[in-house]
Amino acid sequence: MVVRRKRLPAAGRRETIIAAATPIFATAGYERARVSDIAARVGVTEPVVYQNFGTKAKLFGAVVARAAGHLAEQLDTLAGQRGDVLELLAGFLAVDHLDRLHRRGGIGALFAEAASDEAPKDVRKASQAAIGVLINALAGLIRRGQADGSARDDVPAETLAWVVLSAIIAWGFRQRNTTISPELEQQILTAALHPLRRVRVRG
């Protein structure tokens, strides 16, 4: 007797494909990842994947958007926690956390590839949208710090969010192009949070 796979609603099928594609793209990279492998992992044919996303580039863009959404959720969770916002951000910028994000197979690898000059137009467009999502989430966390006095409030939260995101991007650049000890790397990341500290007025 043949067991028929239950047909998923369109939105559920897209999510299932994105979930299956994420580790494949993160590990193999955009160029080497095969849509046939993604389809096989889901248990559908390759044309079904294309019916849902149109092109491999648009599928990769959807994967990047989903990854940005997950990171934004982590930042929103931090914003809801008590405690000094700079200490919470220091945990987010810890070397071991960034290493997990950026290593091959991590979602940071997706963002790095999506932002490269060689990425297809649809992928770069998705990368720009993903960066916007992350900036909004970071700015929300920083606004909470500005409201409770744990972050400076004389600079717009969005500006400070770009400072933090720039530190994360620079970390990836250093990992690809230099050899720095974990201790020095952590010092650099800690110093990147200095512009977020409240300016103490000396009386």
Image (spheres, rainbow, N blue to C red):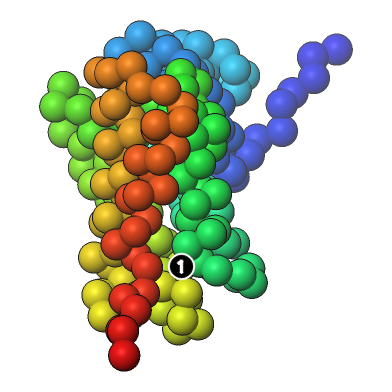
Image quarter where the C terminus lies is bottom left
The amino acid at mark 1 is Leu
Tell me the residue at 31%/71% (across/down): 157
Residue at 41% x, 48% y: name it. Answer: 190
The residue lying toward the viewer, choosing from 20 and 153, is: 153
Q: Residue at 42%, 62% (x, y): give it.
A: 137
Considering every residue shown, the one lying at the far front of the view is 203
- Quarter of the image containing the N terminus? top right
Determine whether the residue tagged by mark 1 lies in a helix, strand or loop: helix
Left or right side of 79 for 66: left
Query: Seen in the image, is 81 located left or right of residue 113?
Result: right
Measured from the top left, where is residue 110 in percent x and y?
38, 29
For residue 51, say whether it is visible.
no
Is residue 5 in view from this perspective?
yes
Residue marked by disc 1:
141
Please indicate whether residue 157 sits to the left or right of residue 102 in the image.
Answer: left
Q: Is residue 89 left or right of residue 128?
A: right
- Give the residue displayed 55% in from the left and 69% down from the top: 84
